[in-house]
Image (cartoon, rainbow, N blue to C red):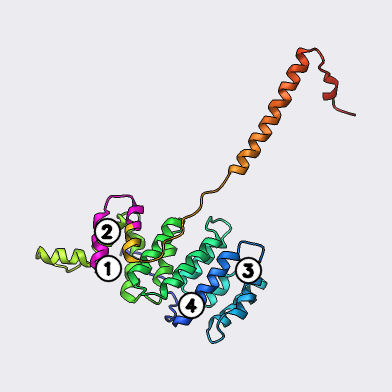
């Protein structure tokens, strides 16, 4: 009997949707860590300062206490956020884990900036469509792994079971099917086309995306994905994803040029001394 291995979706602990004041204080937390985290103030001191600033009636105060305890022992935020899965979403924890990884290029300042924009977006009319597009664009622009990233996204409390299963199903399709096609085939715009042509919708869908998203995806098929993300961000109203800044190697280039100029000057000086027959080669002898 042939046994086929069945790939099971990982089970994530999905916390509840937090109250509005929690996201207000989270936005303040990540904003301060983004603005001053890479400066002269260590994260431990910033968390201690935020411990006294945030609203005392929110659960963020207890979360900061736990983060402070963990960072004093291990120097990392990720392990503590894993233990606080009832408060922080899996996507928030995933970004912090990637920023603290020794082998990754995802900067912690970028993670704080992304989380600050996401917390502010949740204070507005945040829809599952806009939140998913924002989180997925973060994975693309930051070059994070789709498998672990989509798994973390699927555990967000804003998504219901149908949304979570659809996001988990994307892990096997990303890279094989154009992302614009995946959005179009899961939109109400595609469903309306099937119904208009009197075709059956059985076995297709789920049609989770609205018709406007489907039209934008259909118009950007076989194009550069940056055009798709740009159009979606303009029309859906979710925050702009921070783009990785190119490495400024101008200082290194100037130092290499200065060293090369010094070597050229030394060679020219030796050539002039040799031409005038004043070159003293004894100065190059090894001193005993």
The CA span between labels 4 and 3 is: 20 Å
Q: Residues within 10 Å of mark 2 (few under 14, many from 20)?
A: many
The answer to whether the residues at label 2 and label 3 have Cβ atoms under 8 Å apart is no
Label 1 Cα crowd, 10 Å radius (few <14 / some 14-19 / many 20+):
many
Which secondary structure lies at badge 4? Answer: helix
Q: Nearer the viewer, mark 4 or mark 2?
A: 4
Quadrant of res 229: bottom left
Mark 2 falls on what kind of element?
Answer: helix
Distance from Cα at disc 4 to Cα at disc 2: 32 Å
Q: Identify the residue position indicated by label 2 in the image.
A: 217
Find disc 1 in the rendering and name its residue: 209
Q: Is residue 92 visible?
A: yes
The residue segment tinted magenta is 209-230
Residue 24 — which label? 4
3D distance between C-alphas at marks 3 and 1: 39 Å
Pointers 2 and 1 in contact (CB under 8 A)?
yes
Q: How far apart, in angstroms, are the residues tagged by discs 2 and 1? A: 10 Å
**Badge number at residue 43:** 3
Please provide percent x and percent y for residue 131. 38, 69
Badge 2 or badge 3: first in the primary sequence: 3
Q: Which quarter of the image is occupied by the N terminus?
A: bottom left
Whichever of callouts 1 and 4 sits on the residue coming sooner in the sequence is 4
The answer to whether residue 198 is left or right of residue 212 is left
Cα distance between the residues tagged 1 and 4: 27 Å
């Amino acid at each position: 009997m042939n046994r086929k291995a069945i790939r099971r979706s990982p089970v994530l602990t999905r916390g509840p949707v937090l109250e509005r004041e929690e996201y207000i204080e989270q936005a303040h937390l990540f904003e301060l860590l983004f603005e001053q985290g890479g400066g002269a103030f260590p994260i431990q001191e910033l968390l201690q300062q935020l411990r006294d600033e945030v609203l005392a009636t929110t659960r963020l105060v207890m979360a900061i206490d736990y983060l402070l305890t963990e960072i004093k022992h291990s120097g990392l935020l990720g392990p503590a956020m894993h233990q606080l899965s009832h408060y922080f979403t899996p996507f928030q924890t995933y970004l912090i884990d990637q920023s603290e990884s020794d082998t990754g290029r995802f900067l912690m300042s970028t993670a704080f900036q992304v989380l600050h924009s996401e917390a502010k977006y949740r204070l507005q009319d945040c829809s599952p469509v806009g939140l998913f597009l924002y989180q997925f664009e973060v994975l693309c622009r930051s070059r994070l792994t789709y498998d672990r990233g989509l798994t973390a996204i699927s555990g967000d409390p804003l998504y219901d079971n149908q949304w979570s299963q659809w996001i988990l199903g994307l892990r096997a399709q990303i890279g094989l099917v154009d992302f614009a096609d995946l959005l179009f085939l899961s939109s109400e715009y595609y469903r309306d086309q099937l119904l208009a042509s009197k075709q059956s919708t059985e076995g297709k869908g789920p049609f989770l995306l609205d018709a406007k998203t489907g039209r934008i995806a259909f118009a950007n098929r076989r194009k550069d994905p940056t055009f798709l993300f740009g159009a979606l961000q303009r029309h859906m109203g979710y925050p702009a994803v921070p783009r990785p800044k190119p490495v400024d190697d101008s200082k290194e280039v100037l130092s290499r040029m200065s060293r090369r100029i010094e070597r050229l000057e030394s060679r020219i000086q030796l050539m002039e001394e040799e031409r005038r027959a004043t070159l003293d080669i004894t100065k190059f002898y090894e001193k005993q």
